Amino acid sequence: MAAADSNGEQLTIGVLALQGDFEAHARTLRGLGARAVEVRTPADMEELDAVVIPGGESTTIGKLIASAELEPALRAHHEAGRPILGTCAGMIVCDAEHLGFIDATARRNAFGRQLQSFEADIEIEGAGDEPLRAVFIRAPWVERHGPGVEVIASYEGHPVAVREGAVLACAFHPELADDPRLHALFMAMTTGARERAREEAET
Ligand code: GLN
C-alpha cells in the first residue's frame, strides 16, 4: 500500500498552512492513508516524513515563511533528504531563485496573466499510463533546469512537473483534480526516503 512503508507504519506529511489551498492537499493525502498535519510553526515540522508547499502567491508565501521563521526547519528537512512537494506557487518557492531546493528556475505567470486558469490532460512519468487532468491557475512553467532535474511532465513544450532527488515540483494544482496520482507518486517517494533513512541508521 502506498501510504505505509514495509513496516506498515503510516506516513506523516506536513502541509504548509500559511496561505493557499492547504486543506485540499491534506484531504487528498488523508484519502491515500497518510496522516496530514498543518504546518505553521517550526515545531510543526518535527517528525515529518515529507512536506507539501501548496499554491497561492509565491511572494506572500515567501514572506510568511520568513515571518514564521520556518526557513531553517525547511532547509533541515531538505538536507535530511526528506521529500518536498511544491505545487504552483510552491514550485516557485522551491526554485533556484528562492529556497533553492531544486536546480530549476520557474517563470511566474508563464502562461500569461490574462489566461487566469485552464485545464489540460497531461502525461506524467511514473503516475500511470492514463493522462492526468491538470488544473493550471496563473501557473508558472520551468524556464531552465540543471542536468540533475528530471522533467516528468510537459505542456506545450514547457516542463510543468519536475523532480530532483526528493523534491517534486509541479506547476499545476494536483489537489484540485479528482485524481490523487501525483500525491500517490509523492507518497511513494516518501516511503522510499523513509526506508533509505532507516537502512542508513541501521548500518
Ligand atoms: N501566480 C502565482 C505566483 O506567481 C502562483 C499561482 C498559484 O499558485 N496558483 O505566485
Image (spheres, helix red, strand yellow):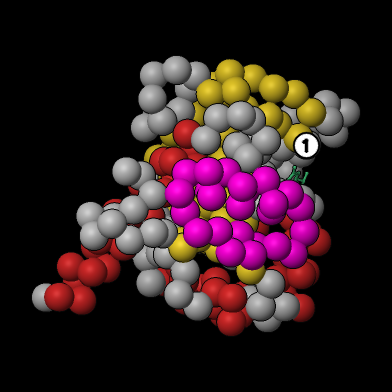
| Residue 11, picture quadrant | bottom left
Across and down, in percent, residue 130 comes to 45, 17
Q: Is residue 196 magenta?
A: no
Q: What residue sits 61% from the left and 47% below the top?
A: 27
Q: Residues within 10 Å of mark 1 (few under 14, many from 20)?
A: many
What span is colored magenta in the figure? 15-38
Residue indicated by mark 1: 138
Q: What residue sits 45% from the left and 49% below the top?
A: 33
Across and down, in percent, residue 39 comes to 63, 68
* Number of numbered discs visible in the structure rendering: 1
Q: Is residue 26 above or below residue 119?
A: below
| Residue 95, picture quadrant | bottom right
Respond yes or no on whether mark 1 lies under 8 Å from ligand 1: yes
> Quadrant for ligand 1?
top right
Q: Mark 1 falls on what kind of element?
A: loop
Q: Is residue 55 left or right of residue 159?
A: right
- Looking at the rendered image, the quarter that the C terminus falls into is bottom left
Q: What residue sits 41% from the left and 71% below the top?
A: 79
Whether residue 22 is visible: yes
Across and down, in percent, residue 12 comes to 46, 63
Q: What residue sits 44% from the left and 41% below the top?
A: 184
Closer to us: 148 or 161: 161
Q: Amino acid at mark 1?
A: Arg
Closer to us: 93 or 64: 64
Q: Is residue 103 left or right of residue 195?
A: right
Closer to us: 17 or 170: 17
Across and down, in percent, residue 82 comes to 41, 64
